[in-house]
Structure formats: structure tokens, C-alpha cells
Image (spheres, rainbow, N blue to C red):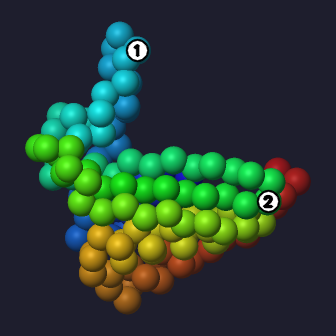
């Protein structure tokens, strides 16, 4: 899911997406706000994925970099059957949730799907 969001969110011109490792060289974890500050961005999006059987719950939070204050948060729950559609849907919902304007061209790029062979 992380990789899908890092691939999809940059398709929205209004967002600056910086991928940044969450671990320091000594192996300790840094808070998302600290990572955002180090990456020189205003906010960080953090989240988690929980799967139970054929259901998946995705929790995302947007944090202000300078204070760690939560700006926005949401949970999405859906069936795990079509994971590619779920990834696109969550990207769209995040953009809607944080009030980012998406152009019609960006909308097409976000919803475009490709065939995936399950045998692969």
C-alpha cells in the first residue's frame, strides 16, 4: 500500500511527495513529524494497514511537520478482493480528505488500471 500511495500521490500536481525512510542509521524510528521536518515538507502522511480475513482497514493521518499536530485523519475499510482498485480508491479518498484539487487529467491517471496476471 505504501508503494502504491508513493506512486499515485505524485500524479497530483498540487502535492509534493517526498519518500523518506522512517528509520535512522542506528535503527531507531523517527516520528512522522520529524521526518517531515527533515525532508523540508509542511506535513507528513502516516498510516497503517490491518487485514482480517478478506477485509482490510487502512488508517491514515496527516501531521503538521513543525508541531506533530494531527491535521486530518481517516479510516477506510473494504474487501481485499481487488487490491489494485482499493489502492486507487484510497489515493482518491486521501486527496479528497486533505482538500487537494485534482484536475480531470489527473483523475484519469489515478483511475487508470492495468491488467495483472494472478499467476505471476
| Residue identifier under label 2 | 54
Label 2 residue SS: loop
In the picture, measured across the screen, residue 42 lies left or right of residue 11, that is: left
Count residues near mark 2 (Cα–Cα under 10 Å), then give few for <14, some for 14-19, many for 20+: few
Whether residue 27 appears in this view of the structure is: yes
Instruction: Report the side of 44 relative to 91 (left or right).
Output: left
**Does residue 7 show up?**
no
Residue 27's x, y, as percent? 40, 15
Mark 1 burial class by Cα count in 10 Å: few <14, some 14-19, many 20+: few
Q: In which quarter of the image is residue 88?
A: bottom right
* Label 1 SS: loop
Q: Mark 1 points at which residue?
A: 27
Seen at 45% across and 74% down, the residue is 92
Q: Residue furthest left?
A: 66
The answer to which quarter of the image holds residue 33 is top left
* Residue sitting nearer the eye, 78 or 69: 69
Q: How many marks?
A: 2
Residue furthest to the bottom in view is 104
Seen from the viewer's position, the closer of residues 102 and 28 is 28
Q: Write the residue at 32% across / 85% down.
A: 103
| Residue 118 percent coordinates (x, y) | 84, 58
Marked residue nearer the N-terminal end (2 or 1): 1
Q: Where is residue 17 in the image (x, y as percent from the top left)?
A: 30, 54
Residue drawn at point x = 37 percent, y = 61 percent: 73
Q: Which residue lies furthest to the top in this view?
A: 26
Please tell me which residue is depicted at 37% across the width and 89% down the height of the picture. 104
User: Pointers 2 and 1 in contact (CB under 8 A)?
Assistant: no
In this picture, residue 64 sits left or right of residue 51: left
Amino acid at each position: 500500500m505504501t508503494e502504491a500511495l508513493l506512486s499515485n500521490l505524485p500524479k497530483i500536481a498540487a502535492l509534493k511527495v517526498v519518500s523518506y525512510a522512517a528509520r535512522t542509521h542506528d535503527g531507531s524510528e523517527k516520528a512522522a513529524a520529524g521526518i517531515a521536518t527533515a525532508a523540508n515538507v509542511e506535513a507528513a502522511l502516516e498510516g497503517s494497514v490491518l487485514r482480517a480475513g478478506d477485509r482490510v482497514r487502512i488508517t491514515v493521518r496527516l501531521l503538521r511537520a513543525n508541531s506533530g499536530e494531527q491535521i486530518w485523519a481517516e479510516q477506510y475499510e473494504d474487501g481485499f478482493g481487488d487490491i489494485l482498485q482499493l489502492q486507487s480508491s484510497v489515493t482518491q479518498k486521501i486527496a479528497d480528505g486533505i482538500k487537494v484539487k485534482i484536475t480531470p487529467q489527473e483523475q484519469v491517471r489515478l483511475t487508470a488500471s492495468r491488467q495483472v496476471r494472478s499467476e505471476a
